Amino acid sequence: MGKIKKFSFLFLIAGLGFILGPSSQSGSASQEAARSQKPLQHEVAVTLKLIQVYVTDKNGKPVTNLDKSEFRVFDNGQLQTITEFERHMSPAPSPGITEPPIKEAVVSTEITAPRLGRKFFVFIDLDSNDLEGIAKSRAAALHFLDTQTLPSDEIGVFSSSFMRGIVLHTYLTTDHVKVREAIQRIREVPGRKSGGTGDASTPTIVVSGQDSGIVIRSSVSSGGGPSTDRMIALAKALRYIPGYKNILYFSQGGSINDRAYRDRLDEMSREFAASNAPFYAVNTETPDPFSPGGTKGGDLLAFVAERSGGRAYKDIGAVAHFADIARDIQDLTRNYYVLGYPVRESWDGKYHKIKVEMRSGDYRVQAQPGYFNPKPFREYSDLEKDLHLFDLAMSEKTEPAKPMIFAMRALHFANKNGAQVLMLSKIPPEVIEKFTNRKIELVSLIFDEQDNPVDRKQTKPDLAKYRSMDVFYSSEALLKPGAYRCRFIIRDLDTGEAALAFALATVPVKAGSGLSLFSPMLLIAGSNFAYWDMGTKKNTAPWMDLYSYDHSLYSPVMEIPKGTSRIFAVVPFRTFKSDQPDIAYTAHLIDSISGGTIPLTSSVLNRTRLRDVAVQFLEFPMNDVPPGKYVLYLHAEDAASGAISYTQTSVVIR
């Protein structure tokens, strides 16, 4: 599917993401009644289809000096007017240099066209492999990452096995350090020599670190090879990512003698071709002197690569020559044109066939064969809806347009169960108004440093009852020490429109002795709000006992209004050497841009104790603090024991 530029935007097209777990129960009857009175209408939109085109001469060399007047594009047989044009050209290797530095040169045109960069998925097949093949696959993938990728290239990482299904280790990202870490983490037991078993309840596609997913029956050849049902599901998901998605597939292949399995492979390969996802398949089998012919798994690799529009390096031992293969893949993918033309968008999910040809010249043209129209979000399968949710939570792209953003705070504390992260977010009036009387869901997600989802909760609230007041949604999770990314997503289940809140959280290593401060909760005077906790699904939750204050006088604050004279903080803490702590605080605001500090005076207004945790209620005058982004740094010392500790939180003054 071509990249889309909306001139009239109503719907967020789904990108690729992966299964995050089961949905919660249905929404209220009042919402259902409101929807039944007015059928959903999709606004007619003009979209810009962007397609990638590779052009080579009769010797297979890339042609780099063409302009848009030399191309013709047909959409379902109709000649189109090319309005957008861009060249993406990388310099060729210099003679005598084995691994040239890669630098992309985007040739400017008379029209400013949106960028459509390269995308790669590293895909390591664990079933049709052995330990040596997996190790060589990782090394080859890292070699490609280090020597043949551009800073602008987006890269994702998959592996597959019969036991776990298809596992997403990292989503498409330009953070190549994260990609390297994801590749190095693939250390599962191979299938070919381990005799691994599985059944039809094995998840289809899962996120690394997750144990559940949507069930789909598998089709696996006794001679090895991919599960076609799983791969077809992946291919269909890839439809919604713009441009080419080049798949670097590392496998030892399998037998294609079985007619039924061969037919399924053909269907699978053509689905990848329709999704503009060609396979560059590399045989990872090591030559065996006692079996020179090997397993003949290369025939499967050639079959899939040819039908998907890619290329196979099928010879036994091919992966040992991956430096040459990597340069070949680079030559095939580094030089391309982007052609764009406007179309009226139709919400029917139908396939459009694209044909690109040259007006003159002896050239070979390779372009995506077509694209799928979007379909209404309410017609998405459960799998596709989860793909969309994961894309909202994890995508770093700016196209399609980002959803509405609202504020969140992530606080860490500890109780009898262990270390906790509290996600607290104020849903602003404009978001409440936008999603009132719609069928919506609110999802909380927490990802660890490897992007594994470690917590997910869902509910289907009725936002109408929160009109004219502030509503704070909260969710807490028991977590190990480490860094986490937190998300709240509000999503319309009919249209896919969404609003998003995000924050970073850190759970520190448990203090061994002395004094330990937990995250402060900031408050301002005034009260017209409601709490709703995702875990208890009511306006009370265990964390509220720890962060206790008078709800009739104060309310939590995400951003402090300009001119606020005082802010307040609930600061829980734990002491390990003193039964009667005497805590003195030093507070500073640190400017996030300049690094300058503003000292704050603090007063303790109240102190309470909840079992082994004490809670202090502090006041901070904010006179003459200018608008900006700050970090509130609290340093505490227990005069009774001499123990010290600190904590901090972000402060935004609007």
Image (tube, rainbow, N blue to C red):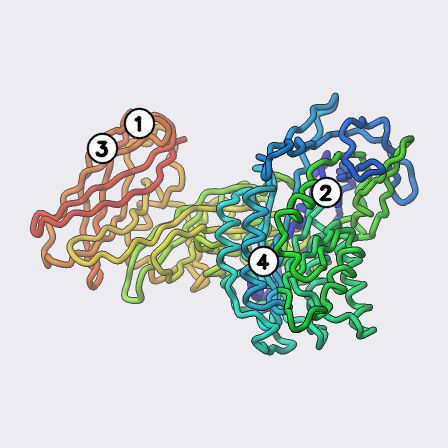
Question: Is residue 321 shown left or right of residue 596?
Answer: right
Q: In which quarter of the image is residue 35?
A: bottom right
Identity of the residue drawn at 52% across and 41% down: 405
Q: Residue 137 carries which label?
A: 4
The CA span between labels 1 and 3 is 10 Å
- Among the two numbered marks 4 and 1 on one chain, the one whose residue lies closer to the N terminus: 4
**Tags 4 and 3 in contact by the CB under 8 Å rule?**
no
Q: What residue type is labelled 3?
A: Leu
Q: Quadrant of the C terminus?
A: top left
Residue to which mark 2 is pinned? 332
Identity of the residue drawn at 33% across and 32% down: 564
**Tags 1 and 2 in contact by the CB under 8 Å rule?**
no
Q: Is mark 4 on a helix, strand or loop?
A: helix
Q: Nearer the viewer, residue 46 or 160?
A: 160
Residue 529 at x, y percent in the picture = 41, 48
Residue 653 at x, y percent in the picture = 38, 32
Residue to which mark 1 is pinned? 625
Q: In which quarter of the image is residue 296?
A: bottom right
The CA span between labels 3 and 2 is 60 Å
Q: Which mark is residue 600?
A: 3
**Tags 4 and 1 in contact by the CB under 8 Å rule?**
no
The CA span between labels 1 and 2 is 57 Å
Q: Is mark 2 on a helix, strand or loop?
A: helix
10 Å neighbourhood of mark 3: few (<14), some, or many (≥20)?
some
The CA span between labels 4 and 3 is 56 Å
The CA span between labels 4 and 1 is 56 Å
- Among the two numbered marks 3 and 2 on one chain, the one whose residue lies closer to the N terminus: 2
- Among the two numbered marks 4 and 3 on one chain, the one whose residue lies closer to the N terminus: 4
Q: Residue 358 carries which label?
A: none
**Tags 1 and 3 in contact by the CB under 8 Å rule?**
no
Residue 476 at x, y percent in the picture = 40, 58
